[in-house]
Amino acid sequence: MSFTRRKKMLAATAGAAVAALTLAACSSDGGDTDSTDEATGGTDTSAEEVSLTLATFNTPGFSNSENDAEYQYDLIEEYMELNPNVTITYDRKAESGDARENFFTKLGPGGLADVEMVEVDWMPEVMQYSDLLTDLSSDAVDGRWVDYVEAGATDADGRLIGYGTDTGPQGVCYRADLFEAAGLPSTPDEVATLLDGDWANFFAVGDDYVEGSGGSAFYDSASGVWQGMTNQLDQAYEDPDTGELIVLDNDAVKANYDQLMAASETQSSHFGQWSEDWFAGLSNGAYATMLCPPWMLGVIEGNATDTTDWNLANVYPNGGGNWGGSWLTVPASGSNIEAATALAEWLTAPEQQAKAFANAGTYPSQVAAYDDEAVSGAVNAFFNDAPIGEIFADRAQAVVPSPYKGEYYFQVNDAINNALTRVEDGTDDPEASWDKAVADIEGIG
Amino acid sequence: MASTDLDTSKAYSPWRQRMGMWDRKASPYLYIAPFFIVFAIFGLFPIIYTAVISLMDWDTIRNSGEYIGFANFDYVLNDRKFWVSLRNTFSIFLLSSIPQLIIATFIAAMLDHHLKARTFWRMGVLVPYVVMPVAVALIFSQLYADEYGLVNHWLGMVGIDPIAWHKEVIPSHVAIASMVNFRWIGYNALIMLAAMQAIPRELYEAAALDGASKARRFFSVTLPQIRPTFIFVIITSTIGGLQIFDEPRMFDTAGNGGADQQWLTITMYMYNTGWGELNFGRASAIAWLLFLIIIVFGLLNFWLTRRFVSSDQSGSK
């Protein structure tokens, strides 16, 4: 979640007072209702002219316009060449937070693009309004994605409202030099064996590391580990059937909290994720491990250019974990739903996602893409030639569908993350901090 | 006087006369009408609409809501975060406005002297104002990083323990206030400078002849003379200070005002409630409470201004 929050903060400079007051002024501009929608299926030559809009954020690897650097493939151009009657207007927001605001501003009154990208962080909120999005399920895409990606976009009525693009299966990034100095095994295979087990095992290794290193921190932040632990619970904050808050009666959540807080006292660097200190820690060895989705590799590389000892182990405590990922949705208010669906279907097909991965490193969520040489053969030079293609394919298969995330998921998660941070900062002790979180959660709704 | 004019010139036809009367009476209203029409659309309507939404459990996406009376206000007024954010807002406001006014006045007084390359210095103080607040916040957040930040590094060199800028309440407010000051001191200094330049130089000469020192001349001539400008600057910085958003929002990467709401301001609280939680009913309630607070402050300012102005007049007699 912090991934989105970070992006949100980078984006958030608009006057809040204005934002709250001017919601009323947005109206639909979908004027071309008179066009008969006989759009593209696969036949293209004699089909009617269609213009589509596609809205994304960050760098999904679709178009050269995303970046200063040339991509290997331009998928948007390619689609327009394959379907000469289709003209695509590509609108990319810099940050996920911008896209979220735009999405929820226009979802009701209309005015969204024909195809809208949605990030995993705000997908639970989007699912509240799944009836305003097109049901995209079809035989053509049946079984295309790994289970948890498909489950994340399927609503209570079984409607599939999003086609998965990329995803974020996690391994463990670690500093081989620091492991070695602390007297721990340090090759990727050895570390994978060492960390194979549950969270108790992970924290036990952490204790060894703290002792062997003379008191250095084992992992980057409690928040990072928290989302890893919580995402493995069957039920976390809300009842899947009723949507009611169950977090305060859920012993598993409190047990995770206690376990994590006990370990964090010595094992966490106590830095907030994405804080300046946290970034500095990537290169100065303030911590030795991080739970690592594919997109994190670029973050580490970009902020630890002088460090040569980051490596990636094919392991994840207690099974699998996912952090990040997106879907393409088709708002039901659009005027070219059929053509829009065809575009989303094509863009999220394994072949195209393998190209997007080559372009921008966005790791595919399509099972078949993992057999594509462009994906499976990928190695990362900065991470000492780690075979990231193989590793993340394994990690993706290990992820089980995350707990039910409903309307209140992010408010609860924020409240608990604040509780973790208060303890990390030394503002409160774990119990007092939990009590504040309980008060915050009781006010939700 | 105008009417006697009209009475003597009977040559005008009654119709033209009536038109002239009408013109004189109505046109001022006509000329100011565009402002009020625009205000009604973009100011008054949203204010009323916000009031309506604040009484509802509002779903902004389905554009519908359920009337729930004052439950949103009840929740907000009983929410610890509201009072904490109010405290933070005023604390940051005081920590920024007071040093800002003192330093800006001082700089303006210095710029009022005969400096070489005057324009260069005067434009120079405005440079921070031109820099985007987001850029300022990014630079300052690097300076104020808790472990590896430059400020703590410098403090360490003179033997002071590092300060937890992002963990403790007052340090975080000081850090945010310093960003605000960086941006606004030069701007306010230029306004004060303009006021100072309008002071008749004879006053200084007379004071100098009476044997007043430089300091005495500043306190007895300059300050009383720029009082109206001073009040203007106070009012604008009050309105700006109560709506402070960018700097605290950018102070850390999460932008939520800290895990313990150390630097959550009232506009951030409103933004997070509205856009973060998509709870626009509550956000509207907060907007209205902020509106009322600003009105109270506006009245306070009005009262203070009248006091100052009347004392000014009695002083110049």
Image (cartoon, coloured by chain):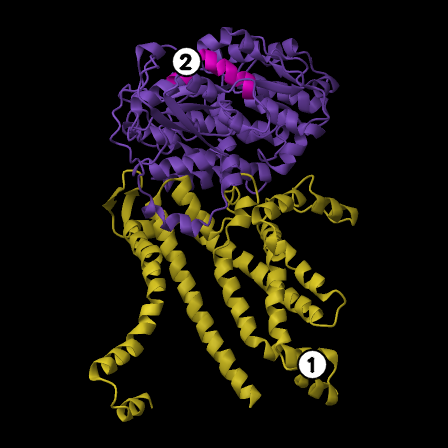
Identity, as a three-letter code, of the amino acid under mark 2: Trp
In the image, residue A163 lies at what x, y percent? Answer: 38, 19
From what the image shows, is residue A97 above or below residue A307?
Answer: below
| Amino acid at circle 1 | Arg
Marks 2 and 1 sit apart, C-alpha to C-alpha, by 79 Å
Residue stretch rendered in magenta on the structure: A345-360
Asked whether the viewer can see residue A162, the reply is: yes
Quarter of the image for residue B317 reads bottom right
Q: Which residue is mark 1?
A: B217
Give the colour of chain B: yellow
Q: Position of residue B230 (x, y in %)?
A: 56, 71
Q: Which residue is denoted by mark 2 in the rendering?
A: A145
Along the horizontal axis of the image, is A4 left or right of B167? Answer: left
Q: Residue at x 56, y 76 (%)?
A: B227
Query: What chain letter is assigned to the residue under label 2?
Result: A
Q: Where is residue B252 drawn, in percent x and y?
A: 57, 42
Residue A135, compared with residue B224, is above or below; it is above
